[in-house]
Image (tube, grey):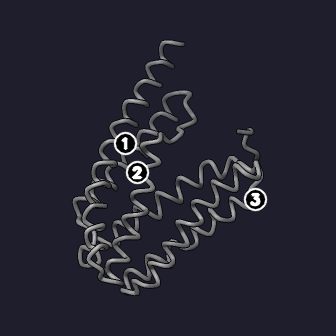
Amino acid sequence: MPEPTDRILTLPNAFTFLRVALLPVILWAILEQRFALALWLMLAGGVSDFLDGYLARLLKQTSTIGLYLDPIADKLLLSSSFLVLSMADEQIPWMVTGLVLARDAAIIITVVVLVVATDLRKFPPSTLGKWNTLMQLVAVFVVLADIVYRWQILHWARNASMVLVSFLVIASGTQYSFQMLKRVVTETKEK
């Protein structure tokens, strides 16, 4: 993978900015109970998430801002969607939303502490973390699809996705904690 550039205006970044721009519209649609609109906008957000990473690799257009903005856009989109769907007649159980928000808060606090207290500056996602993000996106999409279409298979998928999200949040959060601890210990030994 080539070194990231300082370029901001790249095609992959445009898809990331699109995802950030969709966020308030998706949240508004959920709060206004325009679930079909929210469903299709969330699908557009998911496609933009795939395209920004794919195009960055394909076109060799990785950028420093993209490396930071992409995971922030993911966290904003998913965490706020979980929160708003819990607020909307508890379409997502508060316990699941609490787990998602607690993991994200723990990661943010950990990163801030490590940036302030150590020389660590890169925090690449693990494979388990990527699966967690994908499952959260699928869960939000399935919940919205179940609200709109009311198919029995979507209801089952909705329940299964809540279990899978909970498991992956806990597993990836635990893995991330151990990875950061290992990196800090390694850095301390090298000094």
Residue type indicated by callout 3: Thr
Three-letter code for the amino acid on which mark 1 is drawn: Ser
- Residue to which mark 3 is pinned: 10
Relative horizontal placement of residue 190, taking residue 10 as reference (left or right): left
**Mark 1 / mark 3, whichever is N-terminal:** 3
Amino acid at dot 2: Asn
Picture layout, residue 162 above or below residue 180: below
**Circle 1/circle 3 CB separation < 8 Å:** no
Residue 137 on image: x %, y %? 43, 62
- Provide residue 56's location: percent of width, then percent of height: 70, 52
Q: Quadrant of the C terminus?
A: top right
**Where in the figure is residue 71, as x and y percent of width and height?**
53, 52
Q: Earlier in the sequence, mark 1 or mark 2?
A: 2
Residue position for label 1: 172
Tag of residue 3:
none
* Label pair 1/2, CB-CB below 8 angstroms: yes
Quadrant that contains the N terminus: top right
